[in-house]
Amino acid sequence: MRSKGITVLILSGALLMSGCSMIKEDPVYELPSGAPEYTQKYFEDQDEYLLEINGRTYSYFGTLKNRIKSDSVCECIGYMEGDENARLYTLMEDPLDNYIMIRNAEGIMEQPAFYRAMDTRNKDILTPSYIESLGYECWGSSGLHYEEQKASVGVVCNAGKIREIEYSVEINGIWIEEGGTRYGNFKELKLKDVFIIDIVENRLIDKVDMTKPFNVEMIFKVITVDGEEKEVSGVFNHDMMMGGYLNNLEIRYDDSTGYYLYENY
């Protein structure tokens, strides 16, 4: 078995010479007042040094693949014992905190390390695309996928003088998000164009059982080319599954009703 006890100790030293110069430039990387101190502890049965954070145990998992954007960093949660520059961060693309990033604040090169929660062993979990697994034996067949599961609704624009389609989404009666879709140049939407609304995995975590159907309800508004906001009468309400795609929804217009939803079966 490959010993990570040695590997992690070497990494901790390497962090003093590497890290990310962006930390000094972006407030998201700053160490908050009163931030806690964390210590790597050796676990003989695992033959490695592990981190215990908020009741979960994390093991060294991987390194950076390409680059990470500053807006991928959620918050600084503390630092490694004896070195306030070796800081721990949660990640925006990982809402369940299955990964923790360690990064040094006074390094020259950008090379963070990623730890993964041990309770995710042998599970297929959503993994930010910038994390590269180093293939340590302790993770065995633990799965990871870089593409989020999603359910998608295709909306056809079958009315003129629309610049933008706005929507609000509820899942099983719980409000999830608001959004909108338009052309980048703010031009009038073309008739028959299809706009895809994706309901992505990380919006549903802890809200639904994603192995079972869930109810999707959407209401719509449009912004006209003159900048006026108009309600779209009717409500989209269907049961869907992750991976599903419905494409029979249209926004139409007539003089008596105004803008309205039409489901084209």
Image (cartoon, rainbow, N blue to C red):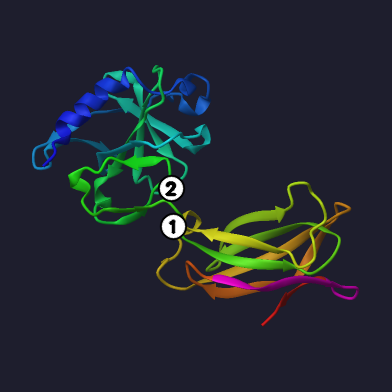
Residue 40 drawn in magenta? no
Q: Position of residue 146 (x, y in %)?
A: 42, 51
Q: Is residue 254 above or below residue 222?
A: below
Q: Nearer the viewer, residue 11 or 77?
A: 11
Q: Is residue 88 above or below residue 23?
A: below
Instruction: Report whether 210 appears left or right of 227.
Output: left
Which quadrant of the figure has residue 10? top left
Disc 2 crowd, CA 10 A, few/some/many (<14, 14-19, 20+) = some
Residue drawn at x 66%, y 83% as measured from the top left: 265
Q: Which residue is mark 2?
A: 95
The quadrant holding residue 233 is bottom right
Which contiguous range is marked in magenta?
245-258
Magenta portion: prevailing SS class: strand
Mark 1, other Cα within 10 Å: few <14 / some 14–19 / many ≥20: few
Q: Look at the image and tell me whether residue 54 can be seen.
A: no
User: Left of 252 or right of it: where is 148?
Assistant: left
Residue at the extreme front of the image, as rendered: 66
Which residue shows up at 36% across the image and 35% down it? Answer: 101
In percent of width and height, residue 237 lies at: 61, 74
Q: Are marks 2 and 1 in contact (CB under 8 Å)?
A: yes
Mark 2 belongs to which amino acid? Pro
